[in-house]
Image (spheres, rainbow, N blue to C red):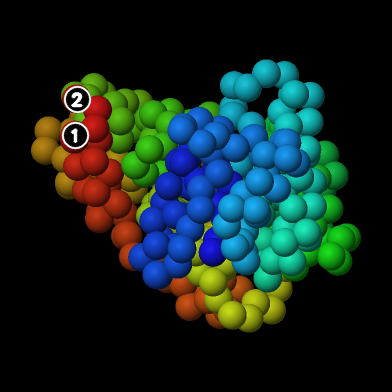
Amino acid sequence: MILVTGGGGFLGTHVTQALRDLGEDVVIAQRRGPSPVDVTDPASVRELGRRFPITRVVHLAAAGLGDGSTLDKLWADTLALFTVLRAAYEWNVERVVLASSIGVYAGVTPDDGYYREDVPLPVASPHAIPAAKKIMETVAAVQREVPSVTARVGAIWGPLGRPASPFFAAPQMIHQVVRGQQPAAPADDAIDMLYAKDCGTAVARLVTTAELRHSAYNIGSGRVTSNRELAAAITRVVPGARIALTDGGETQAALDVARLRADTGFEPEYALDRAVADYAAWLADHEK
């Protein structure tokens, strides 16, 4: 049985569905609901091991973007990491997949436009999220008791995601279009975007693939998508869509996903137009 912490959240919901599609039994740990689990509380997490035969873990739970001070977020994320790893050690699990972020590459300037997993990461971080992820990756790399893999997740968008992101414009653009509004965005801002359902599949492959050769994997599309490309896709798919593109923008590096493809066989199923159509249809049904 596979434990998914944060399994009721944005990414967790898609990872859980992908695992179930693969025929896996899944137990969800989430802060809210009829049986809440506090992943910062060892007793709360250990109780899951007494109730379920947990063999693998996907650790997605993290402090929210608006949850307290930077110190509060770092404390909660680090405490949850140690709590989950300690429980996984006691349960003798086969593998723990730890959700990291494309943000750990901040400050890296690749010559060929691709972030690769073997590049040295700067110690400094511009935000609490990549800071917490670097702590996590450092701990995962130095400990030997629990077989662990880090998944450096790119810019993910899709059903259940936030209507706006401080890191890329796609969520706000599609949400506003579906509401009949006119979003505005820099035309040439570009980032490695991956649809949430594809991200769920990629993480599910990392936790279920029998043999992995590396300790860190990028999860993305392997290419950058600009707001100009996204706007064109939205206008093709959503009748009457109006988007105001402004000049300029910044192109970030793409995630090199060669490791992920080679070891798990993962390939995205949602090209841009299909992702836009799927998300717009979901929003039309869920945000009336």
Estimate how packed mark 1 is, as few (under 14), some (14 to 19) or many (20 or more) residues with alpha carbons within 10 Å.
few
Q: In this picture, is 133 found above or below 21?
A: above
Q: In which quarter of the image is the N terminus?
A: bottom right
Q: Mark 2 packing: few (<14 Cα in 10 Å), some, or many (20+)?
A: few
Say if residue 218 shows up in the picture: no
The residues bearing labels 2 and 1 have C-alpha atoms spaced at a distance of 6 Å
When the figure is inspected, residue 205 is found, relative to residue 17, above or below; the finding is: below
Q: In which quarter of the image is residue 152?
A: bottom right
Q: Residue at x 74, y 66 (%)?
A: 92
- Residue 215 x %, y %: 72, 68
Name the residue located 85 percent from the left edge and 44 percent from the top edge.
123
Q: Residue at x 57, y 68 (%)?
A: 206
Q: How far from the left and from the top, in percent, is residue 231?
A: 29, 41
Confirm or deny contact between disc 2 and disc 1 (CB under 8 A): yes
Front residue of 57/244: it is 57
Tell me which corner region of the image, top left, top right, bottom left or bottom right, holds residue 114: bottom right
Q: Mark 2 points at which residue?
A: 288
- Secondary structure at badge 2 equals loop
Q: Is mark 1 on a helix, strand or loop?
A: helix
Which label was assigned to residue 284? 1
Against 22, residue 286 (above or below) is above
Q: In which quarter of the image is the C terminus?
A: top left
Q: Position of residue 192 (x, y in %)?
A: 50, 52
Residue 201 is marked as none
Q: What residue type is labelled 2?
A: Lys
Task: Please identify the quarter of the rendering in which residue 285 is found.
Answer: top left
**Residue 286, image x, y percentages:** 24, 32
